Image (cartoon, rainbow, N blue to C red):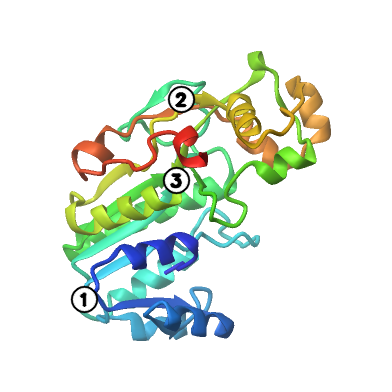
Amino acid sequence: MGCGDVGVRLAQALPARSRVLALTSTPERVPELRQRNIVPLHGDLDVPRTLARLAGIADRVVHLAPPPNEPQQEWWRDLRTQALLRALRLRTAPAAFVYGSTSGVYGDCQGEWVSESRPVQPRTPRAQRRVDAERQVRFFGRGTGTRVSVLRIPGIYAPDRAGGTPRDRLLKGTPVLQPQDDVYTNHIHANDLARALFAALWRGEPQRVYNASDDTELKMGDYFDLAADLYKLPRPPRVARTTAQEQLPLMLLSFMSESRRLRNDRLKKELGVRLWYPTVADGLR
């Protein structure tokens, strides 16, 4: 579910003998999926009656579809995940289920190091819906015996991913925060994320949470400075937080209001993931 860029990378990383199926509600994607040896299944997570065919069809499930963005009566619920899990309960549950969540569930941690045992404190509606999805999938695992893994994912980047580098933002000259106002951000290369999902499918502990982050320890402005130097572009202007609130869109400001550094010990020790791109400097180069 949610077979976009990362889902395709995961499919390519699976053993050749695997039979890979992907849910899609977009007929235009069918030829592309078939070309990649992925069997397309027509269905829509927003239309629960189209999901019955998913019951019992696979022994391992990866759920990368985001919660709905549209306003709804129960704005804190992820109704897509609810519909999917109801469908999977109709027959024998899968052996393994991996859910791609977001590190945004931690909220603002004031730049502290954050392990998976830290209580969640979502500050935005979309992060609250992710917390709801995590709760649903872990409850599903406990009730069915499915081995559920939750990967909390930060910013995904890759030079061969649409919008996967800071280049466009640097070309626009979008400002970043001055050092004293700046926040720590976290990153994962799309290929390393696909490998983490692969590892969780086979080695994830039951109902376990993993921070799927690399080793980068940079504030946002330093990240953009690094990218600008690599691309030989001007570094972005630095502004105070008060100025940023007047100049930047709300979505961008929301990322600038949360600061944390993710620990990835579980990713390495329990899942055995050896990062191909340990830092953004490695990945952007």
Q: Position of residue 120 (x, y in %)?
A: 42, 36
Residue 56 is left or right of residue 8, and the answer is left
- Name the N-terminal-most of marks 1 and 3: 1
- For badge 2, the amino acid type reads Glu
Residue type, numbered disc 3 = His
Q: Earlier in the sequence, mark 2 or mark 1?
A: 1
Q: Classify residue 260 as left or right of residue 60.
A: right
Q: Look at the picture and state if 225 lies above or below 80.
A: above
Circle 2 is placed at which residue position?
217
> Mark 3: which secondary structure?
strand
Specify whether residue 251 is in view: no
Is label 3 in contact with label 2 (beta carbons under 8 Å)? no
Image quarter for residue 37?
bottom left
Residue type marked 1: Arg
Q: Where is residue 165, by image quadrant?
A: top right
Q: Give residue 192's mark.
A: none
Q: Residue at x 21, y 73 (%)?
A: 59
* Quadrant showing the N terminus: bottom left
Q: Counting residues from the N terminus, which is met first, the one under dot 3 or under dot 2?
A: 3
Measure the C-alpha gap from mark 2 to mark 1.
38 Å
Q: Residue at x 40, y 52 (%)?
A: 191
Residue placed most toward the observer, 137 or 239: 239
Q: Which label sits on residue 189? A: 3
